[in-house]
Image: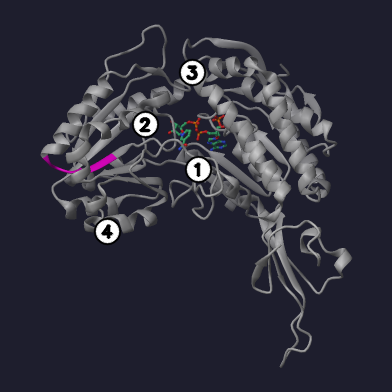
Amino acid sequence: METQNLIGYQYIQSGKAFRAVNPATGSELDAEFNAASLQDADKAMQLAAQAFETYSLTGGKGKAAFLRSIAEEINAIGDTLIHQAMAESGLPEARLQGERGRTTGQLNMYANLLEEGSWVDAVIDTAIPDRTPLPRADIRKMMVPIGPAVVFGASNFPMAFSVAGGDTCSALASGCPVVVKAHPAHPGTGALVGEAIKKAAQKHGMPEGVFSLLYDDGYTIGEALVKHPKTKIVTFTGSLKGGMALVKMAQDRDEPIPVFAEMGSINPVILLPKALEKRAEELAKLSAAITTNAGQFCTQPGLLLAVRSVALGKFKTALAAAIADVNSATMLTPGICANFNKLSGDMLADSNVEVIAKSDKLNTDYINQGIAVVTQISASAFLADEKYKEEIFGPYTMLVVADDKAQLEQVVDSLHGQLTASIMAEKEELPQYKSITDKLAKLAGRVILNGPPTGVEVGNAIQHGGPYPSTSDSRFTSVGTGAIKRFVRPVCWQNWEQDMLPEELKDGNPLGIWRLVNGEMSK
Ligand code: NAP
């Protein structure tokens, strides 16, 4: 494994050494990485800016072949990649195999999008020379890439939201070169994937600098990359504190740039009375969404909302039994585990909070174990203190019990922006709760009927992004083909010669893409 910083096509050894820690054992792993220097960060950004000159003009088929080749190179790493990710993240093998499939699946999905080509949103209004009182010029618009992107790898998806994850993949698909700041928790996984991207880039003759990978176990390099004048866009998945620090940094630059940060979400799930009456035990299977992989998902349901009833009591009993049966699981990093223990411990010690269930199945063979906890609070206490609305990243959920429908609605009104909001309901009771269901689309980016919020589909229609603080810009998604829109801006060509126009905008539609021509969609 190449453990040095990858700058364009060169591996360069620079600053302070660090090692990743196996969170299950607390021991340092063998491979030694070096934090990048400020000169490395500058070189990577300068190269990315140079690469942008040609990469931004690379056609859809060329970029598609590059992305498919990255997927092939990742698969060619084989089990070494899975074992490295297991050692660095504590996540189980099956989950990481699934995540590798998701990562390569995303790359191939973008390749399909590029080969089809209509994603550029071509719009053409042809000239009307004899229009009165003024003639109309020929005007043609499409999306073009913005410039070099800085991608922060996420701790909780060492592959699918990291070095070749959704952000890198959608940036490269758009025509933007990428400099990744690897998450320090899984540098080895990043190094293996980074080498795969380098091989694919060289094989397809991509300009040097289309991809670089830098390490750091602190904030210096991340900050330098966000502040670098050649950086035009930043993406991030992690904490509210980290995300907002980057947003502020980007806004304070001489040239402010967009930061697409995916931050905290508690993903409320509303349990309506008839659903509870009819299927309390089935609804208690939400325990899986609460606890799988120690609940370390941005869409983990951290809040359940219901009106007090006998059926709610049955649900609580079933949920308590399911949670009590969940084995503890290794959390991603010692820091994440310490944070979880502190925040969930504060809740357990809070006089307003009652424990519904706490698993006692602690795996003593390993350390940094996340133990599932479900608590309960009255709606009035919940409404009285903002602290109950903060994300507790891990296998923790709080049930808020309202006295009646009006109070349930008050709780929904009090919530901050979310990635998802779900409702468990029988069809016949939904109309009665329309005042609440109507609020869900204002609250969250994805609203779910009768399903858990976890398990984000990677596709065309998915929305993974919601009002602040769940993300820094609710107009965009970080999952699915829509994620490419974060890296592009519209440009319109007015009154241009045909042979000077991009292929996408020429008469005769040489690429055969969908276009809006004089107000009508056509190929
Ligand atoms: P994090 O602390 O937000 O860090 C994510 C990445 O951003 C890391 O590479 C980190 O660098 C960097 N970073 C953070 N603050 C920065 C700053 N001010 N300047 C420059 N770089 C900065 O997230 P994490 O390490 O993954 O986990 C910590 C907490 O984040 C979790 O306990 C959880 O609450 C939350 N989290 C949320 C989600 C979600 O999907 N909502 C996902 C993962 C984590 P360093 O690591 O070198 O410090």
Relative to 259, is 34 on the left or the right? right
The image shows residue 376 at horizontal and vertical percentages of 20, 34
Ligand 1 has an atom within 8 Å of the beta carbon of the residue at disc 1: yes
**Residue 307 part of the magenta-drawn span:** yes
Vertical arrangement, residue 431 with respect to residue 67, above or below = below
Q: CA distance from mark 4 to mark 2?
A: 26 Å
Foreground disc of the pair 4, 3: 4
Q: Are marks 4 and 2 in contact (CB under 8 Å)?
A: no
Q: Looking at the image, is mark 3 or mark 1 nearer the viewer?
A: 3
Q: Secondary structure at mark 3?
A: loop
What segment carries the magenta color?
A: 304-309
Image point 40% across, 45% down: which residue? 420
Mark 4 vs 2, N-terminal side: 2
Q: Secondary structure at mark 2?
A: helix
Name the residue beneath numbered marker 3: 92
Look at 28% across and 26% down and name the residue there.
373
Q: Secondary structure at mark 4?
A: helix
Which residue occupies the foreground of this view, 328 or 92? 92
The residue sitting at the top extreme is: 365
The amino acid type found where label 4 is placed reads Lys
Q: CA distance from mark 4 to mark 3?
A: 41 Å
Identify the residue at horizontal 81%, vertical 47% (top origin). 58
Identify the disc placed on residue 289: 2
Dot 3, how many residues are within 10 Å of its Cα: few (below 14), some (14-19), or many (20+)? some
